[in-house]
Image (cartoon, rainbow, N blue to C red):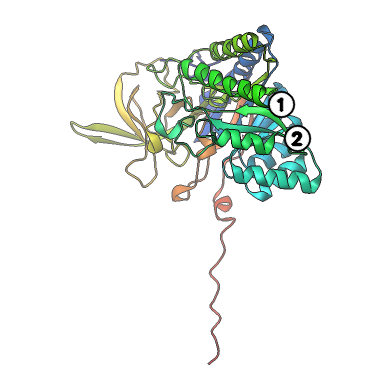
């Protein structure tokens, strides 16, 4: 089986994550438990940053925090010199609680509210990525009313279709995101933004999708955006100083996945920008990227405790765990695939075919169909790998199940960064039924 980051197996046959025994972690913190190997996060961040440095390109690597948002992960990203991509007032508030450097925060989203935009101005963040005409008018109004400068990027759809699941494809023309390059929307947005007195238009942004394994779509998007930037230089003598090419770099969930190293994605995109800048005599823009899944995805492992078993003769065997779609909706939402292991018997042959089912009252609550595991008995600890992205951030309280605890582990040390929800937490916002006030006749 594949192991990730610092994972290994000790002489007891137990899975080790970040230098800590996964079985000990399960006993200390309970299950379900999401364990982040923070050394792997640091390695991935360095991989992106060092490639830009070697190529002599000014860059910002912004953690796309919708993959996993918390105070601790924002603090870790700041430690590593990353910028931050937030997509809501809630993520921005969390970043502020983490005291993340405001000048390195970029605010995304296709329907930012007036309140959220005002909050971004209050925090004096580094950039707002403007997604549509309504938002552009609101940003202009707020900046003018406050007489406050704000950096902006225009998000555009380059008409590039990446090879990924339709639910996570975002760069094609038929997308809810951004100004379309082909129908003139982007040009109109440019006209409205580039000479606005309190707005500093830095350049263009695009994001073509997620979990992408090849570089062609990224290089095509880079060329399309560079062509538009060159056109504005010719027509308006306007030079974009920033080109944001988004994220979407894939990771290995199963043996079928063949992702590239972070450096390979960066190199291919940057080569296009370098070549076109040189041939057109275009001042080399600063390149921004937004890895999310590729920073935290394979750094996260979820530990579960095995419970009941059910055999359907001639069909399948179900092994139930103490979590499920409430803490990982991705398999039910768009058939996401994972691999797993029995964390307390890693050296045993994993040759039994079972389906790992969750405990939600839902037939579709299956974490892995036809998983290969060792013999499983009640009380065993199962590890599901690569759950660091879009699991906790999409978790909910279906069936009133508490969301799991999250810990960081590195070099044998571990710490709680999100405590497990309690039943009291789940009911905290509930209000009692009020007695009706009867009208007097």
* Occupied quadrant, residue 336: top left
Q: Is residue 279 visible?
A: yes
Label for residue 99?
A: 2
Q: Nearer the viewer, residue 84 or 137?
A: 137
Residue sitting farthest toward the bottom: 441
Q: Nearer the viewer, residue 228 or 354?
A: 228
Residue sitting farthest toward the right: 147
Above or below: residue 402 compared with residue 259: below
Position of residue 37 in the picture relative to residue 114 (left or right): left
Label 1 close to label 2 by CB (< 8 Å): yes
Above or below: residue 296 compared with residue 393: above
| Callout 1: SS | helix
Number of numbered tags placed on the structure image: 2
The residue located at (77%, 45%) in the rendering is 144
Residue 369 image position (x, y, % from top left): 32, 30
The residue located at (50%, 30%) in the rendering is 182
Between discs 1 and 2, the one toward the N terminus = 1
The residue located at (55%, 55%) in the rendering is 427
Residue 261 image position (x, y, % from top left): 53, 12
* Label 2 CA crowd tier, 10 Å (few <14, some 14–19, many 20+): few
Residue 181 image position (x, y, % from top left): 53, 30
Alpha carbon separation for disc pair 1 and 2? 9 Å
């Amino acid at each position: 089986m594949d192991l990730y980051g610092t994972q290994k197996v000790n002489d007891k046959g137990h899975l080790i994550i970040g230098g800590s025994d996964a079985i000990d972690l399960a006993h200390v913190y309970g299950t379900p438990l999401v364990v982040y190997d923070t050394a792997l996060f640091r390695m991935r961040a360095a991989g992106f940053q060092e490639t830009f440095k070697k190529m002599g390109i000014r860059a910002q690597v912004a953690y796309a925090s919708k993959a996993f948002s918390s105070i601790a992960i924002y603090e870790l990203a700041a430690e590593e010199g990353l910028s931050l991509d937030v997509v809501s007032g809630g993520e921005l508030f969390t970043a502020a609680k983490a005291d993340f450097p405001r000048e390195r925060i970029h605010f995304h989203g296709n329907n930012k509210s007036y309140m959220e935009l005002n909050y971004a101005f209050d925090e004096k963040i580094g950039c707002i990525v403007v997604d549509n005409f309504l938002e552009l008018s609101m940003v202009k109004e707020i900046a003018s009313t406050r007489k406050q400068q704000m950096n902006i990027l225009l998000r555009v759809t380059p008409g590039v279709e990446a090879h990924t699941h339709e639910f996570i494809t975002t760069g094609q023309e038929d997308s809810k995101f951004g100004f379309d390059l082909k129908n003139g929307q982007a040009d109109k947005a440019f006209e409205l933004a580039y000479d606005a007195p309190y707005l500093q238009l830095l350049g263009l942004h695009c994001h073509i999708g997620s979990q992408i394994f090849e570089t062609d779509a990224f290089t095509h998007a880079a060329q399309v955006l560079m062509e538009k930037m060159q056109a504005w230089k010719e027509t308006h003598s306007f030079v974009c100083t920033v080109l944001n090419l988004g994220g979407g770099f894939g990771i290995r969930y199963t043996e079928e996945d063949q992702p590239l190293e972070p450096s390979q994605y960066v190199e291919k995109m940057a080569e296009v920008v370098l070549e076109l800048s040189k041939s057109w005599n275009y001042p080399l823009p600063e390149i921004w990227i937004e890895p999310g899944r590729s920073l935290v995805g394979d750094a996260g492992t979820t530990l579960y405790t095995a419970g009941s078993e059910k055999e359907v003769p001639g069909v399948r065997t179900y092994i139930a765990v103490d979590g499920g779609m409430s803490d990982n909706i991705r398999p039910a939402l768009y058939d996401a695939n994972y691999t797993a292991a029995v964390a307390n018997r890693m050296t045993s042959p994993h040759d039994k075919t079972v389906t790992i089912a969750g405990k939600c009252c839902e037939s579709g609550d299956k974490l892995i169909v036809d998983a290969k595991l060792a013999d499983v008995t009640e009380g065993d600890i199962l590890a599901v790998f690569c759950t660091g992205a879009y699991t906790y951030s999409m978790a909910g309280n279906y069936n009133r199940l508490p969301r799991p605890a999250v810990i960081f582990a590195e070099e044998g040390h571990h710490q709680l960064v999100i405590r497990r929800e309690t039943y009291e937490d789940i009911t905290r916002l509930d209000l009692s039924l009020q007695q009706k006030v009867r009208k007097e006749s």
